[in-house]
Amino acid sequence: MLVDDHPVVRGGLRALLSSVGGIHVVAEATTGAEALREAVTHRPDVILMDLQLPDLNGIAVTRQVLKSAPGTAVLVLTMFEDDESVVAAMRAGARGYLLKGASQDDIVRAVHGVARGAAIFGQNIAHRVIGLLAEPQRLEAFPELTTREREVLDLIAAGLGNASIAQRLHLSPKTVSNHISAIFVKLRVADRAEAVARARAAGLGRAG
């Protein structure tokens, strides 16, 4: 299944993969919501996933797809090569990560590889992964959050109220409230209790 909001990209990938024996493009999606529906309907062996979509980002889509279709292998195909995106994709369960400048042969090999259960990374991405694993402290929980947002989440998980957090971090209560709202959006949680549960499961909440 192809997930990308650019028709030219999808068309090129469809033409490439359809020309390879043993690979069949069973569905396409242009949004995260559409990708979730199509993944459940078609249960593809492999999803080529862009990270930048009009609604949900590809990281969130990957995480949700693998909950409902755990047998599917997600291969990220994106323009983003920053450490945060790579780590977030790995944490979400992606089996592979390629940049959109990858050769056609590399894309085909990656599709076959993740379908067999291998972890496939483009050359530049592989170097980044090795570097990240060599520095495990960089593999922080919730890489989608800023450093300040992670500090606020840590204190929320420790049981502090907004006023106490504001005092601890030398911020105004309004600024703390804004950070909390951003955290809820980025983590896709409905309320403080859900945010606390996720934060504590990730080892946060010891800052109190």
Image (tube, grey):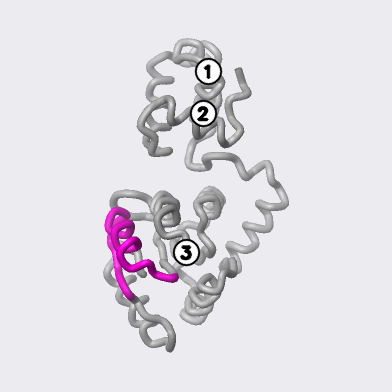
Residue at image point 37% right, 80% down: 24
| Horizontal and vertical percent position of residue 196 | 49, 27
Q: Of the two numbered discs 3 and 1 on the same chain, state the one appearing first in sequence.
A: 3
Name the quadrant containing residue 50. bottom left
Up the image or down, 34 lies above or below 188; here it is below
Q: Residues within 10 Å of mark 2 (few under 14, many from 20)?
A: few
Task: Give the residue type that dot 3 points to.
Answer: Gly
User: Viewed as shown, does residue 208 lie left or right of 107?
Assistant: right
Residue at image point 39% right, 53% down: 61
Highlighted magenta segment, given as a residue range: 26-45
Nearer the observer, 179 or 60: 60
Image mark for residue 77: none
| Horizontal and vertical percent position of residue 167 | 52, 11
Can residue 75 be seen here? The reply is no
Disc 1 versus disc 2: nearer the observer: 1
Task: Give the residue type that dot 1 points to.
Answer: Gly
Q: Residues within 10 Å of mark 1 (few under 14, many from 20)?
A: some
User: Viewed as shown, does residue 148 lie left or right of 179?
Assistant: right
Q: Of the two numbered discs 3 and 2 on the same chain, state the one appearing first in sequence.
A: 3
Name the quadrant containing residue 41. bottom left
Residue identifier under label 1: 159
Disc 3 versus disc 1: nearer the observer: 3
Up the image or down, 73 lies above or below 21; here it is above
Residue identifier under label 3: 71
| Horizontal and vertical percent position of residue 28 | 30, 68
- Residue 44, magenta (yes or no): yes
Task: Give the residue type that dot 2 points to.
Answer: Arg
Q: Are marks 3 and 1 in contact (CB under 8 Å)?
A: no
Tag 3's secondary structure?
loop
Tag 1's secondary structure?
loop
Residue identifier under label 2: 148
